[in-house]
Image (cartoon, rainbow, N blue to C red):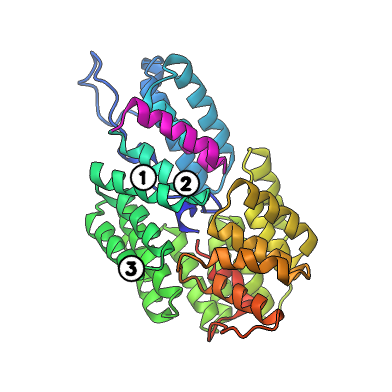
Amino acid sequence: MRAFAILAGLALIGVMAFTIFSFTAAPAQDPAADRPVTETLQARLKRLPTDYRSWAQLASQYVDQARVTGDPSFYTKAEGALATGAKLAPADDTVLAGQASLAAGRHEFAEAVRLAERSIAVNPYGAPAYGVLADAKTQLGDLRGAQEAVDKMLSLRPGVPAFARASYAAELRGDKTAARRYLDLAQNDAWLPADLAYARYYLGELALHSGDLATAGTWYAKALQAYPAYTPALAGQARTAALSGRLTEALDLYQTVVDRLPLPQYLIEQGETRLKAGQAADWTLLKAQRKLFQAAGVRDDLTWAEFEADHGDPALAVRHARAEYARNPNLVAADALAWALFKAGEPAKALPYAKQATATGWQNPLLRYHRATIERALGRSARVEPGFDPTLSALARFS
């Protein structure tokens, strides 16, 4: 899902390409303030090893790199940088916000909330901490608390990070008009190519999940015009090609995507497109990625619940889904548990979770398809989304 697009893959997002480094206050001036502004953080820390804010900024850069590259080893580097910063200034708001961001990156959302709230207690005007708080509360299913954090962030520092989170909050309550309006604001506010690509990409995602493939394709192309290296937009083009029936084109695009960024979400989408094209799906790399993320302390039962339900062992899917829901009872986790229970032959147990997943008005075609399928299995009348292709369900998940 979008708030952690990078946390859960790129998810969770979720959850945002814009972490605290993008808008953290600069370190305090030092006697060598006339040094070139191009000095790297590593060089600065070699010169000023007690600059705890720079350690926090370096950690945030590492968290960004983990999300952007899909390499979870950057989380370990971030942990080391934050440990140094915390020894120097354990109560500094930027250090605490960095720790919160790292916890969210590892899907430790309750811990992320605790640390973000500590950061806010130290500095109530620190917008970055409110961003992490909004993301983590969304993952914990506290949408009201997440909205409050988003509103505070908007009041403190309106800009791309705040507008993007406000868009997602609106989307979760079913207000696509507001979601689109906030993304328009993000696009208008963006001046970095990557920020502009991000806003355009999610405008494409809104169109895609509304069934408007042509508009989605246009936005993905505009995202790549702004920033050609923006892999999510290339993945968006692969989705539109697959959902339009252009499977050969989609597979070519997916190969480029996973060569650049072999995240679980993209690997699953590629595998489903291969199956749709009559080819065998190879999940070897996907399972290798799972081990890498586990080794780096990233707990992602959600991805594996969804994967096992659609392509593996339903009983294992139920175990993963229950574990995810117990920690993070959000809309997507409720849907994953509902679908896992249904695939395991327990539609009556699945229905309450399917109802929870669709209770806010979120117009997510996958969630609505799952609920309708479960209700039909129980002998109830239910409308299945017209044109929805369950063989490409991963492509309907919000990335």
Three-letter amino acid code at disc 2?
Lys
Asked if residue 105 is positioned above or below residue 24 in the image, the reply reads below
Q: Give 21 or 181, whichever is nearer the viewer.
A: 181
Residue at 44%, 74% (x, y): give it: 208
Q: Is residue 193 left or right of residue 73?
A: left
Secondary structure category for the residue under label 3:
helix
> Alpha carbon of mark 3 to alpha carbon of mark 1: how far?
30 Å
Q: Give 355 or 279, whichever is nearer the viewer.
A: 355
Secondary structure category for the residue under label 1:
helix
* The label number, if any, that marks residue 222 in the structure image: 3
Range of the magenta residues?
101-124
Mark 2 or mark 3: whose residue is earlier in sequence = 2
Where residue 197 sits: x, y (%)? 35, 59
Q: Give 320 or 49, whichever is nearer the viewer.
A: 320
The residue under label 1 is: 149
Is the residue under label 1 in contact with that under label 2 (CB below 8 Å)? yes
